[in-house]
Image (tube, rainbow, N blue to C red):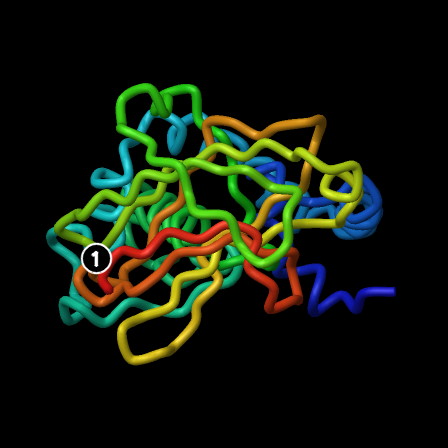
Amino acid sequence: MSTDDNLAEWDAAYVLGALTPQEQQEYERYLAADPARAAEVDELRVIPPLLDALTPEEAYALLDPAGTDEEPGEPVAVTSLADARAVRKSRSRTGMWTSALAAAAALLLIGGFVGYAVIPRQATPTGEVALQAMSPGSRGGVSAALAVSEKGWGTRFDWTCEYTAEWATGVASYDLVVTTVDGAQSTVASWSPAGDEATGLAAATVIPTSQIRTVDIRVAGTDTKLAVTTVNA
């Protein structure tokens, strides 16, 4: 059973549709017992459609909006959209919503909520980028194609997966893992299999493309690479 303190940080995942059905039911029971919090979360329901209309570049621009008092390059750690609104409660309503939208952009793009959920976006079909087949890993069962795009704010990933073995459709979730040239590993996205394939997946990281050695797909919580792309040898 989750504590109220933990549940208070689920609003981002809730409005972005990243909770499991069981977690959604638990969170809605929490909201039913706290009308004030429910009202705050209800105001945030307009954010997902706004995010869906943004390109990754536009979303990242929200992380450092012009005219704020914060020092550039020093993002505030925020795990809750409602908390993000409270940070600027004394400012104008426009500024408050900019803060909430920026927090949501960060949570969506750089994995600020549990699960680093990947949300397929119709606005950025993978047909706009050239996907390259990933090399097979040490265990068969997943065939994937990936595009790695260098951006001014970091790196964007677009990919598709085909689950070619029966076991591959039955795992809880997969991770997209970046290994940097100095050997550090970062999970930049996670998703759950639904059917025999996953298409239109996209994620982003602030890690510069020049610092990425490999990108691989693995079952969440394991080290076995199922598919891998070498970016910088």
- Residue found at the far right of this picture: 1
Q: Is residue 18 above or below residue 207?
A: above
| Quadrant showing the N terminus | bottom right
Q: Considering depth in this image, is 43 or 74 the residue closer to the camera?
A: 74
x and y percentages locating residue 226 in the rendered image: 57, 52
Q: What kind of element bears circle 1?
A: helix
Q: Is residue 101 left or right of residue 25?
A: left
Q: Which residue occupies the foreground of this view, 84 or 229?
A: 229
Residue at 54% from the left image edge and 35% from the top image edge: 161
Residue occupying image coordinates x 54% and y 37%:
143
Amino acid type at mark 1? Thr
- Residue 143 appears in the rendering: yes
- Comparing 165 with 26, the one in front is 165
Give residue 158's position: percent from left, percent from top.
Answer: 37, 37
Q: Above or below — where is 129 with respect to 111?
A: above
Instruction: Out of 227 and 35, give the one closest to the viewer.
Output: 227
Residue 188 image-quadrant placement: bottom left
**Is residue 116 something that shows in the picture?**
no
**Residue ID at (52%, 42%):** 118
- For disc 1, the marked residue is 209
The answer to which image quadrant residue 2 occupies is bottom right
- In the image, what residue occupies the spot 65% across and 35% down? 163
The quadrant where residue 47 appears: top left
Residue 181 horizontal/vertical position (percent) = 27, 73
